[in-house]
Image: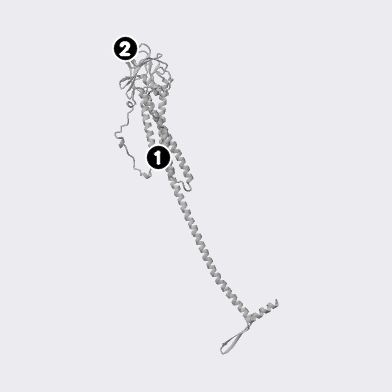
Amino acid sequence: MSRRSGKFKRMMSRLFKERQIYHRSDGVVHFISMSTKTQIALAFVVGSALLWIAYASVNVVFKEQIIVAKERDFRVMETTLSKRLVDAQIAYDDVNMLNHVREEQFDSTMVDISARHQLLVNMVERKAAIDQSIDLLAKGLSAAGGPNGLKAKNGNRVMIDIAHGEPTPRQSRISILRKEAAAEISTKNHTASREGPAANAVRTMDKAAADLFMEQMMLLASIEEKATTQIETLKMMLESTGVSSSALITPAKISNIALAQGGPFIEIANIDGTPIRFFQHANRASIAIDELAAIQAAVDHVPLSSPLIVSRRYTSGFGVRRDPINGRRSSHHGIDFAAAWASPVTSTAMGVVKFAGRRSGFGKVVEIDHGNGFITRYAHMSRITVRAGQKVALHDKVGELGSSGRSTGPHVHYEILFKKRPVNPRRFIEAGRYVFES
């Protein structure tokens, strides 16, 4: 260890030999003696200063680079964050736009559904009112029974007789509209967007709207088909009486159907084909209901019942017969029913009493004007309970059965005149009885 120390000292002595520094000032020469230790100390100080300067310089350079790198990283982070914020804002705007579009679509769908629902409600209410009137009439006619007051046992005989089979069965309107509605829903769902964050909600809403649309279309088809069936039944019933339905129902007075057009101008882009097609089908059903209402209103004034709703016996028919008093062949313009004395004689349809009093040959008689050219006559009564100008409904009492006038016993002579011509009342009674009870 001492050898190494001595060697180090010798080396330092050679490097830092004692030196003298001379300088002259005012003619006087001075010198400064610098020993080895002094030189070592001075070299250490100078070296330390140089090292510090180098360290400081390097530190400044690297610190600047670090600051630049940090600033670059910060700018990258700031750019990334800004991009993410922009993307988030775009996504937010897209969602807002989607929500706005879907909200408008939902509102539009709800408006369409509400309009269709209100239309169906009105249509169902109108159809229910017509059905109620027909049911009331059917119950009254069923209670009156046939000419002899007996209930029919063979079902709808009149319908069987006059309804000829079609060569090919008519396709159900319900099945047709079901196919059309399914095709419309399929087309609409095919064109609708199925992407995006609200896809499941949109699909659920579309399915619910499609199911509701299908139900509404089926209800519409059911209303139309039932109304059409009832129209055909009532028309066949009227035909079975011998009076055509066209003679009782006045058609709408439209001079030019082809030019019957109008309405506000609507851009094609604003039209959703589905509800438009729905309203087209609804128009068909509404026309059927209008026709049914017209026929039902006419039928209410057609005398389809018997003038007696109590136990009775059919004693004389319409047409040529042997006169009950003189025995000669004669024309009989009505039919006769025998029953207990003072049995109530009732109106066979709604109308207005045209005459109430005595007529030659008829005794005490009541005549009722039912409109559409129909007049009914009730003769040989023992007492009259109505007066001229009085309104009567089906089965309202107009008098009591008797034997006044040219009569051989207590009975009621019943006539129906259509446009002042006598028609066979039995056909009307049977038509009303069999058709409405079936």
Would residue 382 be visible to someone looking at this image?
A: no
Q: Would you name the residue on which mark 2 appears?
A: 329
Q: Is residue 377 above or below residue 9?
A: above
Toward the left, the furthest residue is 255
Where residue 151 sits, quadrant-wise, is top left
Residue 19 rendering spot, x and y as whole percentages: 61, 84
**Category of crowding for the residue at label 1, using alpha-carbon neighbours closer than 10 angstroms: few (below 14), some (14–19), many (at least 20):** some
Q: Which residue is mark 1?
A: 275
Q: Amino acid at mark 2?
A: Arg
Q: Give the x, y percent position of residue 366.
A: 34, 18
**Which residue appears farthest toward the front when viewing the image?**
167
Q: Is residue 298 above or below residue 49?
A: above
Pick the front one: 409 or 240: 240
Apparent side of residue 115 relative to residue 250 in the rendered image (left or right): right
**Residue type (three-letter) at the residue carrying disc 1:** Pro
Q: Nearer the viewer, residue 296 or 283?
A: 283
- Residue furthest toward the bottom? 27
